[in-house]
Amino acid sequence: MKAALKPCGYIGTGGVPCKFKTLPGHRYCFWHEVSAPKDGPLVGQMVARFVQQDQDLEGFQLAGANLERRQLQGAHLVKANLEGARLYRANLDGAHLFGANLKDANLYYASLADANVRSTTLTGANLLGARHSGARFDGSELGKHSIVVNEHKANREAQ
């Protein structure tokens, strides 16, 4: 007899619990479990579908996920882990990325217009060509001396 899956242990802002079930033998669901690899080919498609359905993606563990060219307008990715995620040409207009980890993420030519990027970690992020008009970056960590990977490369090449 199979054991029934329990509710995910992730509790979001305001005490809202995750609606997904745990992975067998884990405390969290696939989306909140750090050890569950998010580099599979369907992850980007599923995340885009969740956004289209206006689902809350708070605290999702998407490190290394391929979200290139995905339509993620208005995504609710508060406190999400997007470290090293591939967001090349992703549309994040109006997204809520408050407190997210975008360390080493590739946001090359991504659109962040009117996005809430407050209190995020952007250390080592590639923001070359990213559109960010109206985006709010208050309290965000941009890395050593507040410069991102593109500026580090330019400074090295200029020497």
Image (cartoon, rainbow, N blue to C red):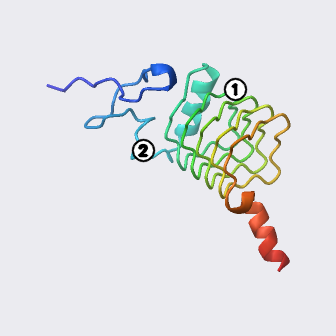
Residue at horizontal 70%, vertical 32%? 71
Q: Where is residue 135 in the image (x, y as percent from the top left)?
A: 79, 36
Query: Mark 1 sits on what residue?
Result: 74
Q: Where is residue 15 in the image (x, y as percent from the top left)?
A: 45, 20
Residue farthest to the left?
1
Q: Which mark is residue 102?
A: none
Q: Distance between the residues labelled 2 and 1?
A: 24 Å
Which badge, 2 or 1, comes first in the chain's sequence? 2
Residue at horizontal 65%, vertical 55%? 123
| Neighbours of disc 2 within 10 Å: few (<14), some (14-19), many (20+) | some
Q: What residue type is labelled 2?
A: Val
Quarter of image, res 79: top right
* Image: 156 above or below 131: below
Q: Which amino acid does label 1 sit on?
A: Gly
* Image: 90 above or below 159: above
Q: Which mark is residue 34?
A: 2
